[in-house]
């Protein structure tokens, strides 16, 4: 196969390769959402790019000019179409891996695994990323095109920091033409930055863990508030960010017994339930579970609640009026 | 007062003018229907009423004295059972009573708002009466596609509390034959001060509403003093701070110009920490002190407010004129010098800003 034949075939097949790439992306995202209910892909995926097919020049370059010794370069080049997912944390990579390995539409092989490389070369700090090659499991009909069995698609999984490292080094070091000498000094510097990145990735993970632990009482309390809201108000509460703000402003109320205290208050003052129901349609704040905590806080410690109140006065004043407490 | 679960249902407006030059009564302009308010407007109205009457030192429970057939409480007693049409017509009587009561030309006219609703748990019925003076202001308005300034010359019930007075009748015992027992009455009047308590606002609470200040004022003022004193004494705070708070209590009762004593007002003025304010109010409520303001009457307290007294464990006593005590004496808690075992670790340093007059 010469360069012209190679390109002719590529041009005739490029369209279905691109359909295949889009399909793989959609399928991985679908499984991600299925495995992780409530996940916001816009937040989870830090860099959203459509699948990328290799341009003619770099294909020819790889096929014929880099001493790769391919028998059939067209079939053996498996990243003619490629996808990249960039996430914040190494645990996010694990979620992606599960999604990649779960689909029955393709077979997945992990061709480059930084974890295995770390084990194999513990003293080395080099380019890190997970590269999968997915091959369609059978002939697939996608967007009106037939994707033949065994059509490859490369999927790279990286953290943001690994991505940053790769952006710095890829064109400069790993793709250097043979014979181009990169000084040992530069290699050393790059290895140092990789070591740092690995450490920072670990710290990020630790920070998220600690944050998760620190907000455990808030999350538990929010869960309880949602349960009470659904049961007593009989409507679906909203989950605006204001909930976190209000809950973190009143840590004293989040220790045990929150549920009992609110239930007791609602039994003593049934009008609270009525008022929340009446305002549900027209007032955002009365749709948030924190409104229940607000009634409890205003009733028991009106002065402290006013001092600690994290949102605008307008959002809490009706509660003061309802309970006959003074604001201001 | 505690206006928990306040809900307003009907609302009628009438306009009362001040008297003519020859002091003749002007017939009020009567409203002929209930006002229809949306949620936001009702919330604002509730807010006005709550700000005025909830834990306010200008809101006092009154004694109903005029119970005649032509009195306000008799009218209120009829209004509360009326359907909407009758409520509108009979509420004119409220405007008439006010026009009668405003005998001086110095008293401005205004809008009389008569409203009913329920309050409390379980809900009790009430009739409320607001006399709102009109003032003016501006608003931005979209006209022909651009913002223009519009002058409003009959603005009422803005958050400017000085411009309204409220009478509030709460049905306490519907079965009672005696109207004075069947209803509780409260007034709110921002312009009420220690000096004109029985003067300026009298046309409103007396001639118009038929109320007087209760005779229990002296007893309640003493109760306020005693309870607050105990609270301060038991407060988990440094002795220095307690000295200041005891002085503050005397100041609040003897010097402060407020016509009433009221727990929130005292707490806001003298307790720096919200936690102590909450604890104080919970304590006063639990001890049964009224949640309205109490007309300040020092009759039962005269003796105890005259002298400020401090007693020490070693039998030393210090006393002085309460009113100026903090100016005449400085008191400081200091560490004891080489205290022996079982001796106190803290001493009190007292500076009397004068020379000794005589000794015994």
Image (cartoon, grey):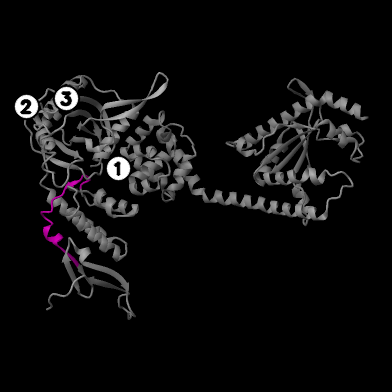
Disc 1 secondary structure class: loop
> How many callouts does the rendering have?
3
- Asked if residue B148 lies in the magenta stretch, the reply is no
Does dot 3 land on a helix, a strand or a loop? loop
- Nearer to the camera, B70 or A254: B70
Q: Is residue A211 left or right of residue B39?
A: right
Q: Residue at x 24, y 50 (%)?
A: B263
Circle 1 residues within 10 Å: few <14, some 14–19, many ≥20: many
Q: Residue at x 28, y 36 (%)?
A: B159
Identify the residue under disc 3: B91
**What is the distance, in whole Å, between disc 1 and disc 3 at their CAs?**
30 Å
Question: Badges 1 and 3: C-beta atoms under 8 Å apart?
Answer: no
Q: Which residues are magenta?
A: B290-309
Q: Quadrant of the N terminus of chain B?
A: top left
Residue sitting at 78 percent across and 24 percent down? A15
Tell me the chain of label 3: B
Label 2 sits on residue: B22
* Mark carried by residue A325: 1
Q: Position of residue B162 (x, y in %)?
A: 23, 38
CA separation, marks 2 and 3?
27 Å
């Amino acid at each position: 196969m010469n360069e012209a034949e190679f390109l002719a075939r590529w041009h005739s097949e490029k369209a279905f390769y691109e359909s295949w790439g889009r399909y793989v992306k959609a399928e991985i995202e679908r499984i991600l959402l299925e495995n992780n209910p409530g996940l916001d892909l816009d937040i989870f995926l830090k860099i959203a790019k459509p699948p990328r097919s290799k341009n003619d020049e770099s294909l020819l370059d790889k096929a014929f000019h880099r001493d790769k010794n391919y028998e059939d370069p067209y079939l053996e080049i498996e990243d003619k179409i490629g996808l990249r997912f960039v996430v914040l944390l190494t645990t996010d990579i694990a979620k992606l891996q599960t999604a990649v390995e779960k689909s029955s539409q393709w077979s997945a092989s992990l061709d480059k695994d930084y974890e295995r490389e770390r084990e194999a070369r513990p003293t080395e700090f080099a380019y890190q990323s997970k590269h999968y090659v997915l091959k369609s499991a059978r002939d697939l009909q996608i967007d009106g095109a037939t994707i033949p069995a065994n059509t490859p698609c490369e999927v790279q999984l990286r953290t943001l920091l690994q991505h940053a490292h790769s952006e710095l080094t890829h064109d400069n070091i790993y793709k250097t033409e043979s014979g181009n000498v990169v000084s040992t000094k530069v290699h050393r510097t790059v290895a140092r930055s990789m070591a740092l990145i690995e450490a920072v990735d670990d710290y990020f993970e630790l920070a998220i863990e600690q944050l998760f632990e620190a907000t455990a009482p808030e999350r538990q309390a929010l869960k309880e508030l949602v349960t009470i809201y659904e049961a007593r108000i009989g409507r679906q509460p909203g989950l605006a960010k204001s909930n976190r703000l209000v809950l973190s402003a009143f840590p004293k109320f989040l220790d045990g017994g929150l549920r009992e205290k609110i239930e007791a208050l609602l039994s003593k003052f049934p009008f609270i339930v009525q008022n929340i129901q009446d305002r549900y349609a027209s007032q955002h704040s009365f749709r948030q579970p924190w409104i229940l905590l607000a009634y409890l806080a205003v009733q028991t410690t009106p002065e402290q609640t006013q001092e600690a109140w994290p949102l605008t006065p307008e959002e809490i004043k009706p509660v003061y009026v309802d309970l006959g407490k003074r604001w201001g | 007062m505690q206006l928990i679960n306040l809900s307003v249902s009907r609302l009628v407006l009438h306009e009362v003018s001040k008297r003519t030059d020859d002091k003749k009564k002007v017939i009020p302009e009567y409203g002929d229907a209930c006002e229809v308010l949306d949620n936001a407007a009702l919330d604002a109205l509730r807010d006005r009423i709550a700000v005025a009457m909830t834990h306010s030192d200008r809101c006092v429970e009154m004694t109903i004295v005029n119970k005649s057939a032509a009195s306000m409480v008799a009218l209120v007693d009829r209004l509360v059972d009326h359907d909407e049409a009758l409520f509108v017509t009979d509420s004119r009587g409220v405007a008439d009573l006010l026009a009668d009561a405003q005998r001086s030309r110095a008293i401005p006219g205004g809008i009389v708002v008569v409203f009913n609703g329920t309050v409390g748990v379980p809900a009790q019925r009430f009739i409320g009466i607001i006399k709102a003076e009109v003032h003016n202001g501006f608003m931005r308005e979209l006209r022909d596609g651009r913002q223009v300034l519009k002058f409003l010359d009959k603005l009422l019930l803005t958050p400017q509390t000085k411009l309204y007075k409220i009478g509030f009748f709460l049905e306490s015992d519907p079965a009672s034959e005696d109207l004075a027992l069947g209803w509780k009455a409260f007034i709110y009047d921002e312009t009420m001060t220690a000096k004109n308590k029985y003067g300026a606002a009298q046309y409103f609470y007396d001639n118009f509403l038929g109320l007087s200040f209760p005779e229990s004022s002296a007893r309640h003022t003493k109760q306020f003093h005693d309870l607050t004193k105990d609270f301060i004494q038991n407060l988990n705070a440094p002795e220095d701070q307690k000295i200041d708070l005891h002085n503050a209590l005397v100041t609040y009762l003897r010097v402060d110009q407020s016509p009433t004593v009221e727990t929130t007002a005292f707490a806001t003025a003298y307790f720096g920490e919200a936690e102590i304010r909450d604890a104080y109010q919970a304590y006063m409520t639990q001890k049964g002190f009224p949640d309205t303001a109490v007309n300040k009457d020092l009759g039962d307290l005269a003796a105890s407010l005259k002298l400020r007294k401090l007693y020490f464990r070693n039998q030393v006593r210090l006393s002085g004129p309460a009113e100026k005590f903090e100016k005449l004496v400085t008191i400081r808690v200091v560490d004891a010098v080489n205290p022996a075992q079982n001796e106190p670790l803290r001493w009190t340093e007292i500076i009397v800003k004068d020379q000794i007059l005589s000794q015994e």
